[in-house]
Image (tube, rainbow, N blue to C red):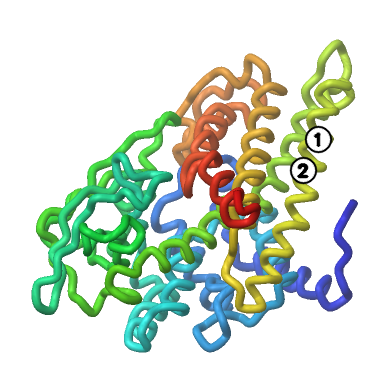
Amino acid sequence: MELTYSPAEQAFRTEVRDWIRENLPPALAAKVRGGKRLSKADYELWHARLQTRNWLAWHWPVEHGGPGWTPVQKHIFDEEMIAAGAPRIIPFGVNMLGPVLIEFGTEAQKARWLPRILDGSDWWCQGYSEPGAGSDLASLRTRAVRQGDHYVVNGQKTWTTLGHHANMMFCLARTDPDAKPQEGISFLLIDMASPGIEVRPIVTLDGEHEVNEVWLTDVKVPAKNLVGEENRGWTCAKYLLGFERTGIAGVAFSKAALSHLKRVARERRKDGRPLAENPFFAARMARLEIDLMAMDIFNLRMIAAAAQGKSPGPEASLLKIKGTEVRQEASDLIRRALGPYAMPFLPEALDEGWNGEPVGPDYANTAATQYFNLRKTSIYGGSNEIQKNIYAKLALDL
């Protein structure tokens, strides 16, 4: 079943597709499609090009620099970006902090920080998780003590994605140690160049340096960088997590993965016939496609609700659960379809310009890396087990 679009929506899709074709460098698209490592400069180049068309903050209100699209237009744009092999929009500034500032920030904070997100002056990272405070985020122990016109922050953050690129971090810190966990937390904006900040790399299972741990020792943060009320940062945190979990679902990425899986299943053979004709493998692909179609409709409903001014509710947890399961299933089926060709783990194959001896089909060299990398999606942003508890409590009153 395919979604149907109006003539105006089809025309918009053509407009987006044509613009991407004219503005996305073919070499950059080839890196994305080949699963190569992208540099900070790659992301910055694409962000800058999107902003020339006013398409970077595609879900922001017009008055803050957004394009004013309908939910369906946002959906189409997301699909076309992924289908064309464009780099993902780094979410921390545009998709996560931006909506929080628009909802909870002062006029001075909006005037300063929103334009800097749009023009690339700031690269943001997320200071949420800590050792012992991941999915149970309210147990965080990083402290912020008010001293005159600034806070002094001490603590440790972990799994800080792309923190080695960032010059700014939005951070949750405990400002009232005696309050109930969720009521003693504040939301602070921290300059990563501040004395007392150390960023240490964490190399993950796929051999990549994508995440970090961040140590904060007597870091001074101006009090004007407090977003919302002191000790009420949990409200900002939950609002942001709704947007994060919706993004983690990655519907457009799953569509691209399904298309790739179908190609692999047509090319790989079992008992002399395409794997796509194997009844057991075909049944798993069909189940995956059905789940993806249902998730696509559910995602559109959530986008429509957001367009009416509603922040993502507990439904974001369901979307995050199913979205990560679908993405992991797609990568698992690709790995199974490749058989022994999926076994080699070649991190060096992700480097631009690598010309080593390929192992099997052209896409086999990165199959293991992608499979390993996607294991994390059901954990970060709040593990799927925690998301089930959230939905059961808030939506089912259990």
Q: CA distance from mark 2 to mark 1?
A: 6 Å
Dot 2 lies on which element? helix
> Where, by quadrant of the figure, is residue 226 drawn?
bottom left
Q: Is residue 279 left or right of residue 16?
A: right
Extreme front residue here?
Answer: 398
User: Residue 262 placed where, x, y %?
Assistant: 79, 35
Q: Amino acid at mark 2?
A: Asp
Q: Label 2: few (<14), some or many (≥20) within 10 Å? A: some
The numbered dot on residue 287 is: 1
- Relative to 177, does residue 147 appear above or below in the rendering? below
User: Residue 137 placed where, x, y %?
Assistant: 37, 50
Could you say which is closer to the camera, residue 280 or residue 391?
391
Could you say which is closer to the camera, residue 135 or residue 201?
135
Could you say which is closer to the camera, residue 391 or residue 156?
391
Q: Residue at x 70, y 28 (%)?
A: 333
Q: Are marks 2 and 1 in contact (CB under 8 Å)?
A: yes
Q: Residue at x 84, y 28 (%)?
A: 283
Q: Amino acid at mark 1?
A: Arg
Residue annotated with mark 2: 291
Q: Residue at x 74, y 73 (%)?
A: 15
Q: Residue at x 36, y 64 (%)?
A: 123
